[in-house]
Amino acid sequence: MDEIQSQSDHYRSPSSSVSSPANRLPSSNFFYSRKPGALRQPISFEDSPVWDETDIEVKVDEGGDSINAATTPPSPSLSKINSGSLPSPSLIEREVVTRKIAGASIAWKDLTVTIKGKRKYSDKVVKSSHGYALPGTMTVIMGPAKSGKSTLLRALAGRLPDSTRMYGEVFVNGTRRHMPYGSYGYVDRETTLIGSLSVREFLYYSALLQLPGFFCQRRSVVEDAIDAMSLGDYANKLIGGNCYMRGLRSGERRRVSIARELVMRPHILFIDEPLYHLDSVSALLMMVTLKKLATSGCTLIFTICQSSTEVFGLFDRICLLSNGKTLFFGETLACLQHFSNAGFPCPIMQSPSDHFLRAINTEFDRIIVMCKSWQDNHGDLSSVSMDTAIAIRTIETTYRSSADAAAVESMIVKLTEKVHLSLKREGM
Ligand SMILES: Nc1ncnc2c1ncn2[C@@H]1O[C@H](COP(=O)(O)OP(=O)(O)OP(=O)(O)O)[C@@H](O)[C@H]1O
């Protein structure tokens, strides 16, 4: 394997020294040597989010939960970094700074999204949704296909397309302002990566494009992102592979696309289907990595279709959607209790997420009818012995009159009545 690696390095080196985009990069003072008048002012540090001194704790890395930021080693040359000829930073003996991320709270109430249908903006994709997400936690939006998960996520991130309209309110740290550039990250379901670059090069390019500042500063944010997404082992690997070695697997690629957003050190990270196309091991690794990121302070909100029991146990809060309606919002354990109260206890040996989705996905009715004769001979296929439409109504009514719904209301009031720390405006 080492031999293949060195062969591939050898294979890459001639081109990387001559024609690789890395070597066509301008020097690090590029931002200060534009033509007079091309830009009124050079891009300054004010364009990148900065962190209060209080956000940073210095300690030796002991594999803790926070993102680890390397203190800057003597600045190596740009071409060395980009050609991957430097030893991996994990191999460099270094003092480590543990960086806490300043997360932000987000709360939404009566959020409705309509799309342009036959009649103008009449189709409601999200209906009167409410909920919140707190710093240092993972909040998951779950539901069957086409239930409005991605639309809700986009609405919270302020990324709805023009063909939609949003009603209701979204508060970030208690205010209704738009989130400034750089204060949040959004990872789409499918992202495009540059296959001819290594992971480190790719993230470094993203940092160059997104973050003005000195070379060494950009380098440290790249190393933070690599550590946060557990990409250390792949940092010098080509994303798309070459004739000697295969490229990154889908789980690794997904983590690279999340790392690209982390380069901005966002307060809130929105991810559409982080487990899209991942096998169960990659899914668990992804979730453990995201949990680690959340415990460092970042607010994580993502959508998910379904999950294994282990993965489900990592979530803090769940927003369960069916056909745009919120059937439950609250802590994951409380959701189990809620289904039980509504008359749908989760059977032993069944994943909670499978059970929830079984109860609220109308598609199952068709499957049950299709398998009717087979089912008679092989026992009951379904853990819910009720028409799904009726089950949905029961779960929704139970939720509306529950203490969970009242607790969410009062938490939203608490989060919106007091203006908390404002987001860093420097990123605007
Ligand atoms: N911009 C849009 N224009 C037209 N229809 C839209 C638009 N956005 C969403 N929809 C429709 O709204 C419904 C919900 O879509 P959304 O992508 O939010 O669901 P989802 O729960 O994320 O589903 P999936 O997991 O299958 O992607 C779908 O029927 C979709 O076709």
Image (cartoon, rainbow, N blue to C red):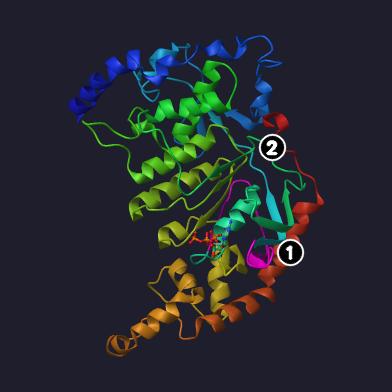
Residue at the spot 33% in from the left edge and 35% down from the top edge: 240
Question: Which amino acid, by three-letter code, is at mark 1?
Answer: Glu
Question: Which amino acid, by three-letter code, is at mark 2?
Answer: Pro
Q: Position of residue 395 (x, y in %)?
A: 59, 77
Label 2 belongs to which residue? 180
Q: 165 or 42, which lies in front?
A: 165
Nearer the observer, disc 1 or disc 2?
Answer: 2
Q: Is mark 1 within 8 Å of ligand 1?
A: no
Q: Position of residue 92 (x, y in %)?
A: 39, 19
The N terminus is located in which quarter?
A: top left
Residue at the spot 42% in from the left edge and 47% down from the top edge: 286
Residue 116 horizontal side relative to residue 14, left or right: right
Asked if residue 137 is among those painted magenta in the image, a careful observer would answer yes
The quadrant where ligand 1 appears is bottom right
For marks 1 and 2 on the same chain, the one whose residue lies earlier in the sequence: 2
Please report the bounds of the magenta region as a residue range: 116-142
The C terminus is located in which quarter?
A: top right
Asked if residue 28 is among those painted magenta in the image, a careful observer would answer no
Q: Position of residue 78 (x, y in %)?
A: 44, 14
Write down the quadrant of residue 8 in the picture: top left
Mark-to-mark CA distance, 1 and 2: 27 Å
Q: Is residue 4 above or below residue 327?
A: above
Q: 130 or 338, which lies in front?
A: 130
Label 1 belongs to which residue? 409
Q: Position of residue 213 (x, y in %)?
A: 59, 19
Q: Given contact means CB atoms under 8 Å apart, are the residues at marks 1 and 2 in contact?
A: no
Q: Residues within 10 Å of mark 1 (few under 14, many from 20)?
A: some
